[in-house]
Image (cartoon, rainbow, N blue to C red):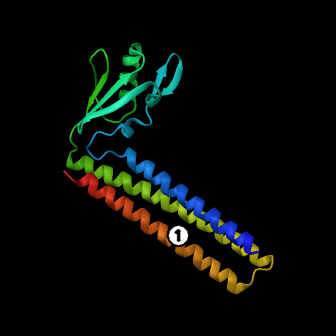
Amino acid sequence: MEDELEFLIDSLMEDLDKVSGHLDKSLLKIRAGRANPSMLEGVMVQYYGTMTQLSQMTNINTPDARTLFIQPFDKSSIQDIEKAILKSNLGFNPMNNGDAVIINIPPLTEERRHELVKMAKVEAEEAKISLRSARKVSMDEVKRLEKDGLSEDRRKDVEIAIQSRIDTMVTQLEAKVAAKEVDIMKV
């Protein structure tokens, strides 16, 4: 019985780590005014008839805080890369110098900063929904174990432990989003 409880807690912790990792990736994609290669992470390019991730066919550098420099391995794909960046709705206007694609990151307006903060909060809310789902699965499993012979006191102890881990994770997620909000609003 204790092995099952230990497995249950370990499984819950894995789920919580996945939720946290997913939120981290989502927050990275929300730009805070500085150039970052991860801004282009989801861009897919039509390359010889196949949709290919931009990062797999180029080197992406940031020579300064406001510029992305994208150097393709195959120079003939430059126009396809430009089209893909425009289609990705990131709000970037790529320029082509014949050897590479250059993107100047425009400074964020106050209105756009507030939109980005809202996006970060939406990501946090989705993470909290995932946490609640993980908690429900764990609590249901504990109740099932009680039917299989787990004492009521032990069940309550495990439920308290599960809730405490969830509360800790919620606090961590809120701290990450608050830090991202400060980063976005910083001019």
Residue 93, image x, y percentages:
28, 28
Left or right, 101 with respect to 151, comes to: left
Q: Residue furthest right?
A: 148
158 w.r.t. 185: above or below: below
| Identity of the residue drawn at 30% across and 50% down | 115
Disc 1 is placed on an element classified as helix
Q: Name, please, the residue furthest toward the bottom.
A: 153
Q: Is residue 48 above or below residue 137?
A: above
Image quadrant where residue 100 sits = top left
Q: Taking 173 as reference, is 36 left or right?
A: left
x, y (%) of residue 15? 58, 59
Residue at (39%, 40%) from the top-left corner? 38
Q: Which residue is mark 1?
A: 166
* Residue drawn 63% across the image and 65% down it: 10
Measured from the top left, where is residue 118 in percent x and y? 34, 54
Q: Quadrant of the N terminus?
A: bottom right
Q: Quadrant of residue 91?
A: top left
Few, some or many residues within 10 Å of mark 1 (<14, 14–19, 20+): many
Amino acid beneath label 1: Ile
Q: Residue 183, located in which quarter of the rendered image?
A: bottom left
Task: Tell me the residue at 51%/16% (across/down).
Answer: 48
Tally of numbered tags: 1
